[in-house]
Image (cartoon, rainbow, N blue to C red):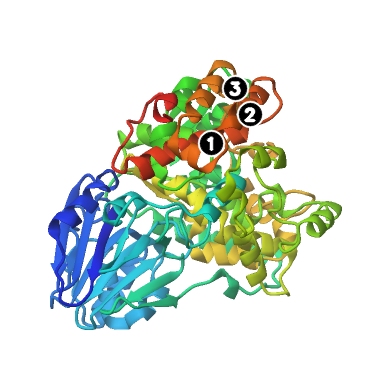
Amino acid sequence: MCGISGFILRPGQRPETETLSLMCGRLAHRGPDDSGIHCSGPVGLAQTRLSIIGLATGHQPMVSADGRLALAANGEVYNYLELNAELRALGRRTLTDSDSETILHAYAVHGLDFLTRLRGMYAFALHDAERGQLILGRDRLGIKPLFYVRLPDRIAFASEIKALLPLLPGRPQLIPSALRQFLQNQFAGGEQTLIAGIRRVPPGEALVIDSELRIRRHRYWSALEVAPRAIGFEEARAELDSLMREAMREHMRADVPFGLFLSGGVDSAVLAAMLEEQGAGRIKSYSVGYRGTRMAHELDEAARVAEHFGFDHHPLELELDQVFGRIPHSIWCADELMRDYACLPTSILAETAGRELKVVFSGEGGDEVFAGYGRYRPPLAERWVKSILHPGSGGFRTRGQWSGHWSRRLLGPALRAEPEPDRSPFLRAWGETPRGWSDMRRRQYTDLVTALPDNLLVKTDRMLMGFALEGRVPFLDHRIVEFGLSLPDALKVRGHQGKWLLKRWAEPRLPPGHLDRRKRGFHVPVGDWLTGEVAAGVGERLMRNPGVRDWFRAEAIPELVAARQHGRGGGRELFGLMQFAIWHRLFIERPGLAPAPDEDPLDWIA
């Protein structure tokens, strides 16, 4: 697990090592164990390394024995042992114990077709000096991030946006449509980020950049290619059992100890059962709850699961000030604006686990893959009404996060004038799906290509890597994703219960009664914190923030604060403005500024 960065220049130019060092330094939190720079012709590569596999021999960037290929990679290729055996049979000789070296050899043998052979989470830059091209590749589901920007003399890339900001020719410029998407959807999706010119490499794609800086897109995987299957319960249960065992066996490959984030829900409990079944032993597990709040937590359930499987369990019971002191650092870590309150406790979990470990397992993806969310199974009448009122996505993802009243009162002229619909990522995804797919499958797909990579996995990667901790997400092994998406609806939902097949398969493995619990989700008591004097302090500072004054109607903020203080809504809007104000300071006004993990958020607004 690492941070990668670099660029390819126009012919005749040579990379500046000081620029590569600057980019690398902005990613140092992702890889504190080692760093390296490689320059060849017009290409410069840099990497900061978190050593997990091949501890002594995995220095990067890696260069092939013949000097033709150079690689900077982030993530894990879980099936590297099997691939290396195949490659050795074809005459390739590995020089390190690192899984990343497999990428070099597999490309040398198979060309771009090698991507279909990889199983894992990864983002990489591979320079083929012989062909004069740079390849930027990203895993199928977008577990690992990768951004790029086209500049007059180069195309640059990095694991995080903050490493690209020093290369921009002037002050970063915002994209109004992306900012509106954040406000209404809680994240901005698609290839365009909030900052003009900086784009995401799409999941399941490789970009091939030639010496003239022309980009050719190569898509090697798409969930659209997953065909629905007619399969019965017994066959599906047996297939799921085989897939989970194989995925867990590969995901447990590491030369360092690993742990588990244990929420008390179904997905992390399933991972606990599989880790114990695969002989992980007395691993460390972590869970989180809150003091001084009315919100229920799952500490007791998590502790019960940990005790059942014999883990070394570490429950964290957090004070509200401790949680919300994470706001500035979590915004800096995320790079991208996203209003997922769960980033805050996740950051504290990551810091705690990162003091002792480099790897933790986490249950992200289980709900998307096996249809656990209630939004996948709405009543027919609700779906029909929403489809009429908000056409284009089958009644799915129709409601904005901001109320119409506060949107009219707070949005500035540029945001109000934006013509692109805020729901455009969902409309595009829905429109891609085959007509023969069920409504439930289309909802799963829409989330798999929007909210999953651009929101949920941003939290999983960036909050953890902010403390040099790798998160492994076995439910997003692409074979399991394909299996879950292909299942008949009747094996996903039965009797208004989601994840039906997964639960029936897991039931014998879990503590008695665990599946009887109602799904709660990973909630954060924002409503208990953003009230009274805190709300007033946030509002007062928002009115002085340059970004807020540029993009919003600051004169309406006192009205918003008053509504919040008197229990008349406004919480999401006030929190979103606060996030934007801090993000604007960190990424637009003062790029390079980095908060400590625990800060007073009010100090960072203005």
Look at label 3 and name its amino acid. Answer: Asp
Which numbered dot is residue 528?
A: 3
Identify the element where label 3 is drawn. Answer: helix
Which of pointers 1 and 3 indicates the residue nearer the eye? 1
Q: Quadrant of residue 146?
A: bottom left
Q: Residue at x 41, y 52 (%)?
A: 173
Percent of width and height locating residue 167: 27, 56
- List the residue tagged with mark 2: 560
Which numbered dot is residue 19?
A: none
Look at label 2 and name its amino acid. Answer: Leu
Q: Judge the density around disc 3: few (<14), some (14-19), many (≥20) Cα neighbours within 10 Å.
A: few
Q: Residue at x 32, y 30 (%)?
A: 596
Marks 3 and 1: in contact by CB < 8 Å?
no
Which numbered dot is residue 577?
A: 1
Percent of width and height locating residue 392: 72, 64
Identify the element where label 2 is drawn. Answer: helix
Q: Judge the density around disc 1: few (<14), some (14-19), many (≥20) Cα neighbours within 10 Å.
A: many
Direction from residue 418 to residue 325 in the image, left or right: left
Marks 1 and 2: in contact by CB < 8 Å?
yes
Q: Is residue 244 above or below residue 412?
A: below
Real-space Cα separation, disc 2 to disc 3, in angstroms = 17 Å
Which of pointers 2 and 3 indicates the residue nearer the eye? 2
